[in-house]
Image: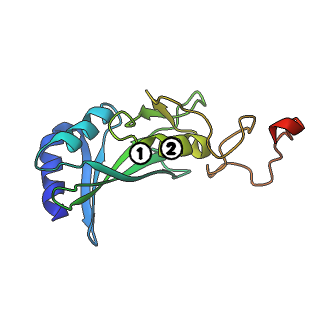
Amino acid sequence: MSIEALARAKEILGPAVVSTHSYRGDDTVVVKPEGFLESMRILRDDPEVAMNFLSDMTAVDYFGREPRFEVVYHLRSFKTGARLRVKSQLDEPEDGSNPVIDSVSSLWASANWNEREAWDLYGIKFRGHPDLRRILMYEEFIGHPLRKDYPKEKRQPLIRRPPDEV
């Protein structure tokens, strides 16, 4: 059933699609980061695909590969039961800043905390996110610990909290 969703996604997204594949029942469409929010809106609102549920979102660091990062969204249609994995690949900016992609939290409220986690642990910024701040690490934490180049022995600043905040 998801194969039809994959074919329809390829059809309605047109030039935004970089590639597609289907492996062991997991149907994946890779889309360009430019216009990512609009691509996701189309997948949600198209009556045939109707990907109305965001079940999960994560990021991947392929250190040493270009593009280095991927964001991965798992969508589901309650109408058809189809599942679709949507990926977008992000280059690491040459100036050392963080990669940026559009937030989909305006389409699916469940993306809010998932995107915050990807920001916190991978350093991927989500343009248009309503509350992009750390969710697992403390605010003074330096770096993003799930990046493959994060030094495992790195010492972080010790932050003493007043007793009334504990």
Residue placed under numbered mark 2 in the picture: 113
Query: Could you tell me if residue 163 is visible in this image?
Result: yes
Count the marks: 2
Q: Is residue 103 above or below residue 24?
A: above
Q: Indicate which disc residue 38 carries.
A: none
Quarter of the view holding residue 22: bottom left
Give the side of residue 99 with respect to residue 104, left or right. right
> What's the distance in space between the residues labelled 1 and 2, CA to CA?
7 Å
- Under mark 2, the amino acid is Trp
In what element is the residue under mark 2? Answer: helix
Residue 45: x and y in percent read 18, 40
Residue at the (53%, 30%) spot, across then down: 131
Determine whether 160 is above or below 127 in the image.
below
Q: From the image, tell me which residue sits under label 1.
A: 110
Residue 90 lies, in percent from the top left, at 44, 40
Q: Are marks 1 and 2 in contact (CB under 8 Å)?
A: yes
Residue at horizontal 65 percent and vertical 43 percent from the top: 144
Measuring 40% from the left and 51% from the top, which residue is drawn there?
A: 72
Q: Residues within 10 Å of mark 2 (few under 14, many from 20)?
A: some
Q: What amino acid type is highlighted by mark number 1?
A: Ser
Viewport quadrant of the N terminus? bottom left
Asked which colour scheme the image uses, the reply is: rainbow
The residue nearer to you, when weighing 108 against 98, is 108
* Residue that protrudes farthest toward the front in the picture: 164
Crowding at label 1, few (<14), some or many (≥20) Cα neighbours within 10 Å? some
Camera-side residue of 87 and 107? 107
Quadrant the C terminus occupies:
top right
Residue 27 image position (x, y, % from top left): 26, 61
Q: x and y percent of residue 5 in the render?
A: 16, 56
